[in-house]
Image: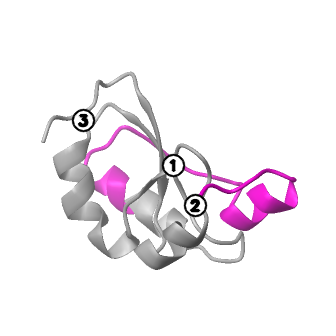
Amino acid sequence: MDKRKSDDFVLVNVLSRDTYEKGHIPGSINIPADEIEKEVAERFTDTQDIVVYWLSEDCHASEKVADKLEEMGFEDVNDSTRSLEGWELAGHELET
C-alpha cells in the first residue's frame, strides 16, 4: 500500500470499527487503538502530521496512542483536545 505524502494531515479515530461506523468526525479515518502499530507503520510516513481522537475527554486512550506513535518514531503526533463527544457538543455533524 502506498504511503501518503508527508505534508498531508491525517485525523485518526482510534475507536472500534463498530463505534466509528455509528458516527465519526468527517474526513477522519479509523484505526482501532489495538491495531495502531501495524496499520500506521504500513500507511503513513514518519514525518506526516497525525492527530488522534477518542470518544470523550475523560478517556485518555488517545493520549496513550499518541505516545506510542511518538515511540515508534513519528515526529508530529497530537492528541486532540476535542473528542468525538466534544465535536458533537460544539454542534458539528457526525459522518456515518
Say whether residue 32 is left or right of residue 26.
left
Residue type marked 3: Thr
Q: Give the mark, 1 or 2, whose residue is nearer the N terminus.
A: 1
Please state which of the two labelled residues, at mark 1 or mark 2, is closer to the viewer. Answer: 2
Under tag 2, what secondary structure? loop
Q: Looking at the image, which is closer to me, 7 or 30?
A: 30
Task: Pick the residue in front: 46 or 53.
Answer: 53
Tell me the residue that label 3 is attached to: 45
Rendered location of residue 90, percent (x, y) = 86, 53
Where does residue 33 sit, x and y in percent of width and height?
Answer: 39, 71
Q: CA distance from mark 3 to mark 2?
A: 27 Å
Residue at image x 69%, y 54%?
A: 81
Q: Name the residue beneath numbered marker 2.
A: 96
Q: Mark 3 touching mark 2, by CB under 8 A?
A: no
**Which residue is under mark 1?**
28
Left or right, 7 with respect to 57, comes to left
